Amino acid sequence: MTFTNDTRGVSEVVGAILVFGVLVALLAIMQTQAVPAANQQVEFEHSQDVQGDFAGFHATASEVANSGDKQSVSIKTGTGYPTRMLFFNPPRVQGSLSTSENQTVTIENATATDPEVDDYLNGSDVKVDTRTLHYNVTYNELQNAPQIRYEYGILYSRFRSGTTVQNPGSVIDDTDINLLFMAGDYSRTAGDTQSVDVRPVSAPARPVTIEGEGNNDITLELPTDLPVSVWQEYYGDQSHVTIQNGTAGTVRITLDGDRRYTLRMAGLGLESGVDKPDAHYIVPAEDAVTDVGAGGNTSVIFEVRDKYNNPVAGEEVEIELDGNTQTVNTSSEGHAVMSVSPSTTGTAVGTIVGCSGGDRCSAEYDVNVLAPGGVINPSGGVRLQDAWINTDIWDDIGNFLNPDDSTGSGVTMEFNASNNLEFEAVRVNYYSPGGGSTPPDEWEMTDGSNTLSGEVSGEFESSNSLDPASNIQVGFVNGGDSYDVTTDDYFVMTVILSNGEQSIYFVSPRDNS
């Protein structure tokens, strides 16, 4: 048998092999170049999304610090890739959300203007705990992904090339100091969206007015991952603020001690079971004085606070008044309440049970019993018609108090007293200073002929009678110096008239310039 060469079909086979080879090559190119590029775009979009989620986290954290109510926020910590037929994707990207090790914030030389709060904020160092919230992620393709940080209400991202601040917060805003602290050892890693509960550990944030002890500067030493140059960029342009490197890993912020500041601090956690700070001090919840009339009743209210100056619930407080003692638990607002009636009078003392911190563990609340017929700003009898600032007060009164500095302003009061009634006894029940300043501790009052003087929230003074038909002048003293009354101030005074009736006057002076 003879065999012959036959080349039919060879070109088709070779062509098919070549087409298959080209297809494999294209798939390889797609797998090694196009797919990674597409995945890098997915990762970039996720990076943008998670930064947006943290902006929402910042807003939620601020709301929780102000309200004291738990809220939830979603953070897309990880991401995956779309399914691609014939191609392979790497595993899902997993991101981690965690808090740093515990760190200590130090506030130096700050003293409260409120005498009760001054039992705690008295110029000695105040140390409170905080942590930084970290978000870290390692992408398969995207390089130089940011590390997101959240501390003291500041949201920022750390890149290899530098730091970008998404929200600078308001740590120092003129004379407002706002410090938001993280608490609890939190760590979660996930490849999808996490629902994060933002829980109040110490909130809502109570404002406290502070100043430098002896007018010396106040300093804040804050542990931070943020470069000091960034702190200076956002906060260093205020004339009363100086920012420097502190000890290792801290920024030192110095505030002009001649100014007064409003301090707010709050603590937040991200899971249940975070230890809340213990009760640290107690203050009167309202004006530290209350009046009760015949047949009526009222309450004394104390507030228990922690080291962050915020209310503590469920704390035992012993309240003693006029020989009677009650032990009550504080409410969700940190309030310990005791009802009082006209049968009780004097000074109520509230003490935190089990507290061993000396003066800061107790506070006082005055209870005054009104005589029958006591009327506030009466329309009959002796009626207060007007009151205004008197800048020459210490020239107009007898000046028996003889203040060291007699430049302060007082008040002139005009009464309608055509019925010949006189003030037989006078008591200044309460003084509320505007702007959070320290209230005066003594008063002096004259009708131009006779003069009375006494202590604010003290007893009735009756050594002389005053004639309200003449303008009544009153000046105040604080710590031996004359007190400067402003239009933001008001005070309450009670008088016993010559007919035996009692009247109460709420005095809020106007400007007379």
Image (tube, grey):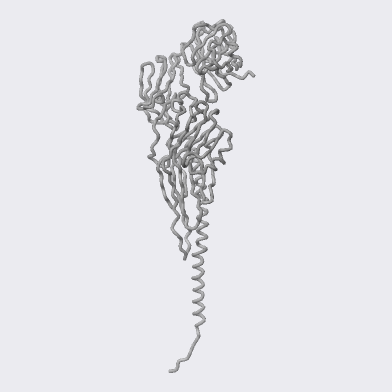
- Say which residue appears at 50% left-offset and 52% top-offset: 145
Q: Nearer the viewer, residue 271 or 485?
A: 485
| Furthest residue in direction bottom, as rendered | 1
Location of residue 95 in the rendering, given as x and y in whole percent from the top left corner: 45, 51
Q: Nearer the viewer, residue 243 or 118?
A: 243
Location of residue 349 in the rendering, given as x and y in whole percent from the top left corner: 40, 20
Horizontal arrangement in the rendering, residue 352 relative to residue 390 (left or right): left
Q: Is 142 situated above or below 401?
A: below
Q: Is 471 situated above or below 187?
A: above
Location of residue 393 in the rendering, given as x and y in whole percent from the top left corner: 59, 14
Instruction: Mark yes or no: residue 209 visible.
Output: no
Q: Is 380 situated above or below 256?
A: above
- Say which residue appears at 42% left-offset and 21% top-offset: 364
Horizontal arrangement in the rendering, residue 404 relative to residue 318 (left or right): right
Residue 409: which quarter of the image? top right
Location of residue 149 in the rendering, given as x and y in whole percent from the top left corner: 48, 45
Q: Is 339 situated above or below 197?
A: above
In the rendered image, the quadrant that contains the C terminus is top right
Q: How many marks?
A: 0
